[in-house]
Amino acid sequence: MILRANGLRRSFDGVFAVRDVDLDVAHGELRAVIGPNGAGKSTLFALIGGQLRADAGTVTYDGTRIDRLPPHRRAAAGIAVVFQGARVFTGMTVLENVMVGAHAGTRTGFGAAIARLPRHRREEREIRDRARESLARAGLEDWADRDAGALPLGQQRVVQVARALCGRPRLLLLDEPASGLRAGERARLADLLGELRGEGITMLLVEHDVAFVTRLADRVTVLDLGQVIAEGTPAQIRADDRVVAAYLGA
Ligand code: ADP
Ligand code: MG
């Protein structure tokens, strides 16, 4: 297992957002996490990425406890997050946006990258090369010098994924990356995620579009009211009465 969450718990103002969640994700797996609004999906991601601390429970990554580590240390260990509703930095080029991702694993790096503080020239060149490589993997190399804010939403999402790739993640968390995208943009994003899985990157994907998830995921975890109510292959999930009742609404 690349990721193991055990008994994870987090409440806000006495209300559980994530309640006793166990989650085992195998190396190379693409795991979908679905559930209604407020189910605790984003909170779960924040507990894995380190943006939030758990009230109880453990998170183990590659056999090591990480639940006490700050986000930049988790990023340095290979965990990258594409946050729900994340925006590109406008007024920066696509390449510059992606370069920010190379700093995710350093404590001061992210702020420094946004502020464009001077860096050592060799380091700067390495980061630029890495960012170009990420852009190429994401099929965005021709857009490198454009203003990221001028891109269509679908391309902006791909920029976010490229930025995450720039940190060379082994575990990539994607929180509703396809929301608001048109069908063609969705299909392209799905292709990209499929390619990344082919490269051996383990992914956790939150998505509302069940068809999108079904095509991509190896396994699906269903959250409701902070708890895991079902887990299985996409076919098993679609046939599960509790899931249909809680989420698919049929
Ligand atoms: P999802 O991503 O599945 O829609 P969230 O993890 O965002 O769900 O939210 C789970 C629950 O926790 C919701 O009831 C939400 O209102 C609450 N919650 C999430 N983040 C916070 C926060 N920072 N402060 C207070 N309540 C929060
Ligand atoms: Mg959410």
Image (cartoon, helix red, strand yellow):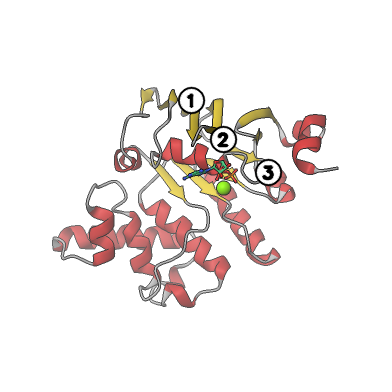
Q: Nearer the viewer, mark 2 or mark 1?
A: 1
Left or right: 135, with 17 as reference point: left
Cβ of mark 3 under 8 A from ligand 1: yes
Q: Quadrant of ligand 1?
A: top right
Q: Secondary structure at mark 1?
A: strand
Cβ of mark 2 under 8 A from ligand 1: no
**Which residue is identified by label 1?**
4
Quadrant housing residue 16: top right
Mark 1, other Cα within 10 Å: few <14 / some 14–19 / many ≥20: many
Amino acid bearing label 2: Glu
- Image coordinates for residue 170, horizontal then vertical, percent: 42, 40
Q: CA distance from mark 2 to mark 3?
A: 23 Å
Q: Residue furthest right?
A: 250
Could you tell me how many numbered marks the image carries?
3
Q: Secondary structure at mark 2?
A: loop
> Considering only vertical position in the picture, is 2 above or below 113?
above
Q: Residue furthest front?
A: 13
Mark 3, other Cα within 10 Å: few <14 / some 14–19 / many ≥20: some
- Image coordinates for residue 248, horizontal then vertical, percent: 78, 43
Amino acid bearing label 3: Pro
Quadrant housing residue 62: top left
Q: Residue at x 76, y 34 (%)?
A: 243
Q: Specify which label sits upstream in the sequence, 2 or 3.
A: 2
- Res. 78 visible in picture: yes
Report the disc number at residue 36.
3
**Which residue is identified by label 2?**
29
